[in-house]
Image (cartoon, grey):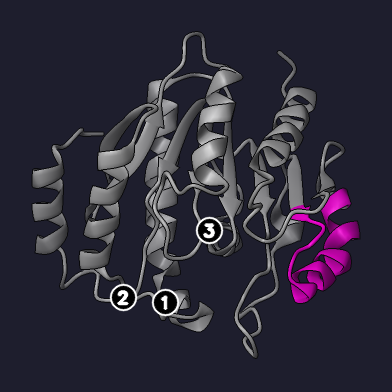
Amino acid sequence: MKRLTLVSLFVALGACNAVAAESDLEREQRLGEEMSMNLFDGEVVGISDGERDFLAAWIETDSPRGTVVLLHGRGFHADWQDVVGPLRVRLAEDRWNTLSLQMPVLDVDAKYYDYVPTFPDADRRIDAGIAFARERADGPVVVLAHSCGAHMIMHRIAGQGVSGIDALVTAGLGATDWGQDPVAPFPIGQVEVPFLDALGSAEYERVLGLAAQRLDAVKATHASSAQVFVDGADHYFKGKNAELGDVVSTWLDEVFPR
């Protein structure tokens, strides 16, 4: 995988605009600039998905246990202040390499249904992120996805299973917009690796209902799979990122002992 300067990366993004008609590449560029100017931990890298280059926030640790690939929620960037930003740093402290991918973004007013056509683009980015992780370090590759990122990883699993993934963590899986149902059932039965389904106890009511419906399916995926609630956390885990970090870290220690 090649490392790019921000200028060369954004030139490449612009050149691919016709290919990526579903994504708002200008907004992605602005988000990338915001992330790059404010990144304190790790470095910004450019990764190619075979059709275009995109940004990721990378932390490489000493004697890594493996790599956690993080997928942010809708309309955010790879070092967003809630969930992916704090988790990528916290898990690096636990000796996990962390690679937080910039996922496709649309206009700020875009809804869940608007994002569905970007899911194939997200598949390519996830595949490229997994390949990058495996090139850089031995050990397991864990995918951790929040909100719309969780929809994206479920789309990828529906198409190709959990190939390349050794464990899966979702946070806030099931969030859509008012009156918009998930376009397809979540392929929980295809998750044949340890799966942590993490949610806030103060989640959206509909998300909590979907979580209750899938509880038995989650537990059936693997002996180490679990559904865990972070007490008092909302969908974005505002003010509860440390608690979410504790939940994820503890579970990873159980699945992949130090």
Disc 1 to disc 2: CB gap under 8 Å: yes
Say which of marks 1 and 3 sits in front. 3
Residue 182, compared with residue 70, is above or below; it is below
Q: Position of residue 226 (x, y in %)?
A: 84, 45
Q: Residue at x 28, y 60 (%)?
A: 28
Q: Residue at x 16, y 69 (%)?
A: 17
Q: Residues within 10 Å of mark 3 (few under 14, many from 20)?
A: many
Is any atom of residue 186 visible in this view? yes
Q: Quadrant of residue 42?
A: top left
Compare marks 1 and 2 and give the one earlier in the sequence: 2
- Check disc 3 and give the amino acid type: Gly
Q: Residue at x 60, y 53 (%)?
A: 161
Q: Nearer the viewer, residue 232 or 143?
A: 232
Q: From the viewer's perspective, tell me whether residue 99 is left or right of residue 242.
A: left
Q: Which residues are magenta?
A: 199-219
Determine which of the numbered discs, if any, sits on residue 149 in the image: 3
| Magenta region, main secondary structure | helix
For the residue labelled by badge 1, is the local secondary structure a helix, a strand or a loop?
Answer: helix
| Residue highlighted by disc 2 | 22
Residue farthest toward the right in the current orientation of the protein: 216
User: Number of marks in the image?
Assistant: 3
